[in-house]
Image (tube, helix red, strand yellow):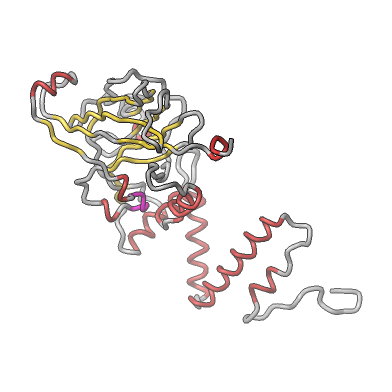
Amino acid sequence: MSAHGKAAFPLFDEEHSADIVNARIGTEVDPRTRQIAEIVVKHLHAAVKEIGPTHEEWLAAIRFLTDTGHMCTDWRQEFILLSDVLGISMLVDAINHRRPGAATENTILGPFFVEGVPFSPSGANICLDGKGEPLVVQAEVADIEGNPVEGAVVDVWQTNDDGFYDVQQKGLQPDGNLRGKFQSDAQGRFWFRTVKPRDYPIPDDGPVGKLLAKLGRHPNRAAHIHFIIQAPGYETVITHVFAPDCPYLAEDAVFGVKESLIGRFDKVEDPARADSFGLSGPFWLAAPRFVLQRSKQEGSR
């Protein structure tokens, strides 16, 4: 209360609830922090008014968020999973990576990227457990004008044919299974051997999985291979190549599929071609082309 017995701020009422809360923000607060807080409060209050929750429903929401926090560990971030299945992760990524049409589009990183994977020579086989249908990836890195990008560093990772990343099955899968790091040559090319990716479920044994079930949604991700492409002077690309015959392309649990990221996988049954890649039978062949955009700093010079 003020010295005159009057409230220093407006007292609460339902109609002006968001404005009343936002009026409490200090005058010295960072402008961006103020903007974010005001918008979040405005839309939260609008949502509550539109929903009209009962006390029991509101407590259920609080319990859900509490359970989500309890599920988080050093290797599992349930709040990121929640952001993923609500499409927020993809929306934030899209806002921050608006690129010209020719440039390769971003998609989400996912929780299973591993730093420090050693380089492999072009042509290496990254499948160490021997499971799955052989796949040869002959990739190319270029700039928007079509010039090859030499020396691009490319991280690659995917699940095995059982639908698990190596870090999810320590002691069951070989360490580093289906992970690789490659460097593009003077023609912007590199290639490697792996296996055809398969669909798999995101972790659904926690509150996010229960939410999906209540919403009548499945937890499956469309079959894909992860790529991170980095080169000096260019924007880093975090992306996937999706298998075109996967039944979950239009229903990816985290909304990661974009039309431009659906690859072409050709079945090759020519023994001579198989032999040229060190294979002994039929295999799949994919030839993705990654197009990099100059970084903003580079473009401003």
Q: Which residues are magenta?
A: 253-257
Residue 259 image position (x, y, % from top left): 30, 50
Taking depth in this image into account, of 43 and 154 the one nearest to the observer is 154
Residue at screen point 73% across, 78% down? 11
Taking depth in this image into account, of 60 and 200 the one nearest to the observer is 200
Residue 197 placement: quadrant:
top left
Taking depth in this image into account, of 187 and 175 the one nearest to the observer is 187
Residue 4 image position (x, y, % from top left): 90, 78
Q: Which quarter of the figure is the C terminus placed in?
A: top right
Q: Which quarter of the figure is the N terminus placed in?
A: bottom right
Q: Looking at the image, which residue sits at the far right? A: 3
Say whether residue 82 is visible. no
Taking depth in this image into account, of 283 and 252 the one nearest to the observer is 283
Question: Is 199 included in the stretch rendered in magenta?
Answer: no
Residue 242 image position (x, y, % from top left): 28, 43
**Residue 73 against residue 132 in the figure, above or below:** below
Residue 28 placement: quadrant:
bottom right
Question: Is 256 included in the stretch rendered in magenta?
Answer: yes
Residue 103 image position (x, y, % from top left): 40, 42
Left or right: 117 in relation to 3: left
